[in-house]
Image (tube, rainbow, N blue to C red):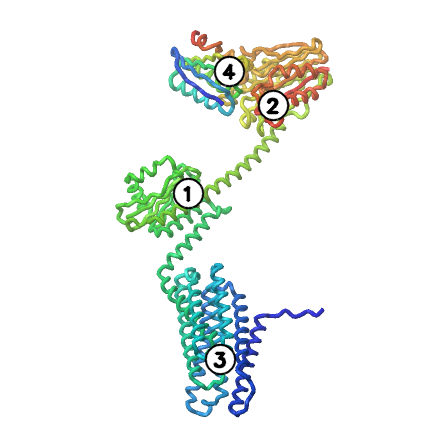
Amino acid sequence: MLRLEKSTENQSEILSLFGEVDASNSVILDEAIQDLVEGGAQSIIVDGTQLDYISSAGLGVFMSYLEDFNDKGITMKICGLSPKVYEVFKILGLDQLIPIYQDRASAAAK
Amino acid sequence: MVKLPSIHIGKLSLLLAILVWLALLFVDLVRLFGMVNEIDSGISDEITWILEILFFFTLYGFYSYSIGKNIQSDFLNLLWRGASTGIFATGVAILIELFYFSLGDSKLGSEPFLKNFFYHVNFALTTIFLISSALLWKHLILYQKSKQVVKQWQAFEFAMLVAMFFVFFNKNNFDYSFFFGMVILLVISAVLSGNLKWIPYLTFKEKWKSLLFLFLILICLGYLFRRFMAYSEAETYQVNLTDNLFLMALFGFIFIYAIFSFLVTLFNLPTSSVFEQKLTEAINFQRLSQSIQPGENEEQVLDILLDSCMSASYSDAAWIEINSEEQKIGTNQLRFLDEAAKEELSELIKNQKAATDWASSDQPETLQSLTLRLSHARFESIMLVPLVINKTAIGRMVLCKEVRDGFNKEMVNIVTTFVRQACIAVENHRLLNQAIQNERYQEELKIAQRVQKALLPTKLDHPDSFSICAFSKAADEVGGDYYDTYQLDENRYVLIIGDVSGKGTSAAFHMSQMKGIFQSLIQLNLSPAQFMIKANSALSKCLGKNHFITASIFLINIAEKKICHSRAGHIPTLFYQAGTSKSEFMLFDGLGLGILRNKQYENHVQEKTFSFETGDLLVLITDGIVEAKNQKGQQFGFERIRSLVEIHHDKSPAEIQNQLIDSLHLFVGGDRMIDDDYSMMVVKFN
């Protein structure tokens, strides 16, 4: 199960994830990010504090925007990941491409 | 044993009837002879009566057998049988009358023996006509019988039986008891004559024919009755056969039923078209409710539907239109109007608010038929019926009539029922097609499964200096996990394990690409990091936008006892060192393949070289094992793998592998499936 919440904070679009991202619902995450981009968001912070699990399909969603965001100058940050979820990002090497922060405050500050 | 020939009841009773009649004739003639010659023949009246009753019985036996045998014959046939028998009996009676008329007052004309003979002939034929007709009536009365009607008929038959023997009591006098018996029998006849359920089943044409036959029967009946009366007035016959309560009651019964049938048929003539219409509707309904046969298509069902609805509602024109997104069925079936008229009508319908409201309803499954008035030159009323399949409106049927307010409630009901039935038939047809297609897909997937299995090596390249085993299981029919081995030269071996993001068919395609890339690039004698860079560059051009592949590659040099390892985002490999009895997951930087699709990737891949000793173990896994969850939602995790390997390190690779897989299944729970592909490769250095 995946639940999404959107909010705005200091010119950053915050996308909070609740539950699990897997192959069956990664499309929802993809659409949410797509919406933010179309809405003209320049800074996106993905809050993964309540994220329990992310599968490779979920990682694929973040990965697919890397180049696009680079070209458009959109920044994407991820924050609040639990150790287990962070490990998944780290194993894949995504931590080298997407800035990952302890919490929302430190993500917003940078 | 003597085998008795099987007795033919029909023939036997006919034969008996003829014999009894001859006996009757003989007895009466002998008695007459005695009277003429004034000798007492000693034959009492009772013998005649007994023979007469026997004659009735045998005839009854013959006819109930012969009509029962032809029970399938339709009503018209039955009526014709009655009429033809009547015509024959009447014809013979008329001939006899004409014969005597031509003789005038000659001697032969008053010859008592001949007269008596003809009297018996007339009696026999009339009795045949009466009994056969009565049995035909029985057949008609008991059509769609209820228990009550059967009881009534049995009572009537019993009363008739009593009437046969009445002659012994009454001695053929017209007294009060005769009239009393007659009244009782006639009342029962009248009650029975209310059973006319066969009439509505006749078509218009058949009704006319049956009217004719009934009329003939009535005429014959009238004539024969007149003849009987004439006989009973003439006192020339010693024993009167015809003033019999049984025969008189039969006359009454046949007359009453014939007259009832005649009148009811006559008055049913105007409504017979309605009944025929209902019958057609029932047949149409049945045609529609039959599921679509192989070889037929939905268009044919709609064809039947349109015709059935038009005939049920007496429409003058009609068409079916199918929404443009539904391309499965050919659109626009027109009946009795051209495209231009249809466009004209569609425009008029569009201008009506009720119709636009109706068309824009967001709940097609509850949509009802709609009848409208139109101001069109030809058609003044139309009816719109939605075609709803699987809760979506696929189109509509439009019925047009030239009269204003031409659709009544019954028509709307029957048309709605027809449409519903047709839609169910179409829906079933589609479901069936879908099932067949699914079956085909399943078959294709099985083929894919076989093909994919062949992509994984059955024989793993390895020297004597290490033993190896591997295992892979896909969550679906096909999966995205990959492992392979390659022997570079005498001393150098390559192992690879990979995992495509996602699972299922798309992952399987990418897995086969990975195999191709590995088998081509590995021959170029690349270092592990170089291999990853080339593989990334190759995969960048063929992977889908949000797909990536993780991989771990090991170049084992058995001469130097060194392993060079590079990791591209893959789950770290467990390395167990026998010397220290410790194991660790080798995690260092390494980005998954296809994530960064440019030169930058080079900065994100590393290479590690380490030595191995005898007894050391390499356990290559995919994330399906680490992330497998139990009922509580806990993951199998790295630590369980590590401790299991440490415990079982002295066993063979196959045993260690089995231990790991068994523990994994135990952890997940016996019946539960692991919902990701999972693979493993275990290497043990000797």
10 Å crowding of disc 3: few (<14), some (14-19), many (20+): some
Residue B258 placement, left or right of B537: left
- Label 1 and label 3: CA atoms lie apart by 84 Å
Q: Is residue B299 above or below residue B223?
A: above
Q: Which residue is mark 3?
A: B171
Q: Is residue B141 above or below residue B610?
A: below
Q: Is residue B639 above or below residue B270?
A: above
Q: Which chain letter matches label 3?
A: B
Residue B200: where, in percent of width, then height? Answer: 41, 60
Residue B91: where, in percent of width, then height? Answer: 44, 78
Which marked residue is nearer to the observer: mark 3 or mark 4?
3
Circle 3 SS class: loop
Q: Which chain letter matches label 2?
A: B
Residue B50, which numbered label?
none
Mark 4 and mark 2 in contact (Cβ < 8 Å)?
A: no
- Label 1 and label 2: CA atoms lie apart by 52 Å
Circle 4 SS class: loop
The amino acid type of the residue labelled 1 equals Gly
Residue B583: where, in percent of width, then height? Answer: 66, 12
Residue B330, which numbered label?
1
